[in-house]
Image: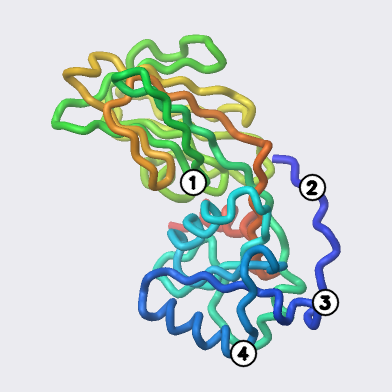
C-alpha cells in the first residue's frame, strides 16, 4: 500500500478551534466529549482540521464511514474496550499530540452484492467484507479471482476479505494472516471451512477483484456484510479495493498502526 507523503502538520495553536469531537454512545465517551469540548471547543466537520473520535474501534469505523468523501484525518482516543485503532485517552496537551501525530492512509473495500431478485447493493468496508451462512446449513461458495475460478466449491460457515488494517480484527479471529500496511496485499480467509478442509486461505494482490458465487442459495442462504452493513440472501458478491477513496488515521509517534500490526504478530 503506497502512502502519499504526509502534509506539513499544523502547529498546536493553529488547531485551537479547529478540532471536532465525535463520541460513541457510551456514557464514558459522551462525558469525555463534553470535557474536551469545554477545553478545546468543537468545530463542525466542514470547518474542522481534524476529528477526534472517542470510543473503541467500532466508533472509529462509524466515524470514518460518517466522514467518507471529506478525507478529514481522524485521531481516536480509547474510551472503549479493544481500541486497536485508537490512541491512549488523555485530556492534556491534545493540540500538541495532534500536531506531531503520524498518518496512516487506508483504502476501503467496495462490495457489490447481488440479491435473489437481481438488485445490486454497494457498500464500503474499512475492516472486511464477510460472507456468513444464515441457517444451520453450511454455505457453498465458488471463488473467482480476476475472473479465473480458483475454488470450485468451498463448504464453510463463511469467508472474508480483509483490508490490512482489518487483518487484525475478524480475519485474525478466523486464523487469517496479519498483513502490514505497506504490503499491498488482501487476506482471503475461510471461516470454519469443512471442504476443502486443509485450505487456509490466500494472500491476494491489493488490486485483485474477488467474486463469490453462492451455490445452492435457496437451500443454503448466505448474508454479505461490509463492516456493519448487511445484505441477506445474496447470490453473487464482488469485492475490490477502492483506491479512489482515502482514509487518514492519526497515531501518536510511539504508537503507530504499522508498529501495532507488527507487534500483534508476536503476541502469544
**Would you say the residues marked 4 and 3 are in contact, meaning their CB atoms lie under 8 Å apart?**
no
Determine which of the numbered discs, if any, sits on residue 11 in the image.
3
Which of discs 4 and 3 lies nearer the camera? The answer is 4
Q: Work out how far the residue at label 4 is from the one at label 1, CA to CA, in angstroms.
A: 33 Å
Quadrant housing residue 136: top left
Say if mark 2 contacts mark 1, CB within 8 Å.
no
Say if residue 195 shows up in the picture.
no
| Cα–Cα span, label 2 and label 4 | 33 Å
Of discs 3 and 1, which sits in the foreground?
3
Q: Residues within 10 Å of mark 4 (few under 14, many from 20)?
A: some
Residue 166 lies, in percent from the top left, at 50, 47
**Which numbered marker is on residue 127?**
1
Q: Which residue is mark 4?
A: 39
Real-space CA distance between mark 3 and mark 1, rounded to the nearest whole angstrom: 31 Å
Q: Position of residue 14 (x, y in %)?
A: 80, 78
Q: Residue at x 28, y 19 (%)?
A: 140
Q: Secondary structure at mark 4?
A: helix
Give the image's coloring scheme.
rainbow
Q: CA distance from mark 4 to mark 3?
A: 17 Å
Regarding residue 197, the answer to whether it shows in the image is yes
Q: Which residue is mark 2?
A: 4
Instruction: In the rendered structure, find residue 104 and report the number of the disc placed on it.
Output: none
Counting other residues with Cα less than 10 Å from the Cα at mark 3, is it few (<14), some (14-19), or many (20 or more)? few
The residue lying toward the viewer, choosing from 102 and 11, is: 11
Which residue lies at the image location 56% right of the left edge and 16% below the top edge? 146
Secondary structure beneath label 1: loop
Which SS class for mark 2? loop
Amino acid at each position: 500500500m503506497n502512502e502519499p507523503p504526509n502534509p506539513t502538520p499544523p502547529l498546536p495553536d493553529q488547531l485551537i478551534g479547529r478540532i471536532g469531537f465525535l463520541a460513541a454512545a457510551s456514557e464514558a465517551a459522551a462525558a469525555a466529549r463534553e470535557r474536551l469540548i469545554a477545553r478545546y471547543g468543537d468545530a463542525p466537520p466542514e470547518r474542522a482540521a481534524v476529528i477526534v473520535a472517542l470510543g473503541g474501534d467500532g466508533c472509529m469505523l462509524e466515524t470514518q464511514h460518517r466522514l467518507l468523501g471529506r478525507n478529514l484525518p481522524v485521531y481516536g482516543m480509547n474510551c472503549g474496550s479493544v481500541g486497536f485503532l485508537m490512541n491512549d485517552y488523555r485530556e492534556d496537551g491534545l493540540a500538541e499530540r495532534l500536531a506531531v501525530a503520524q498518518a496512516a492512509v487506508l483504502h476501503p473495500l467496495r462490495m457489490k452484492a447481488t440479491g435473489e431478485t437481481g438488485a445490486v447493493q454497494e457498500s464500503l468496508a474499512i475492516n472486511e467484507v464477510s460472507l456468513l451462512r444464515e441457517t444451520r446449513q453450511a454455505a457453498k461458495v465458488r471463488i473467482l479471482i480476476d475472473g479465473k475460478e480458483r475454488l470450485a466449491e468451498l463448504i464453510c460457515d463463511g469467508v472474508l476479505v480483509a483490508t490490512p488494517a482489518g487483518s487484525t480484527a475478524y480475519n485474525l479471529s478466523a486464523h487469517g494472516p496479519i498483513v502490514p500496511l505497506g504490503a499491498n496485499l488482501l487476506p482471503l480467509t475461510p471461516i470454519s471451512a469443512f471442504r476443502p478442509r486443509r485450505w487456509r486461505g490466500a494472500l491476494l494482490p491489493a488490486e485483485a477483484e474477488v467474486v463469490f458465487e453462492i451455490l445452492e442459495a435457496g437451500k443454503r442462504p448466505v448474508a454479505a456484510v461490509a463492516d456493519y452493513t448487511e445484505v441477506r440472501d445474496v447470490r453473487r458478491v464482488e469485492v475490490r479495493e477502492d483506491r479512489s477513496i482515502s482514509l487518514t488515521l492519526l497515531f501518536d509517534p510511539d504508537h503507530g498502526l504499522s508498529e501495532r500490526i507488527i507487534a500483534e504478530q508476536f503476541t502469544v
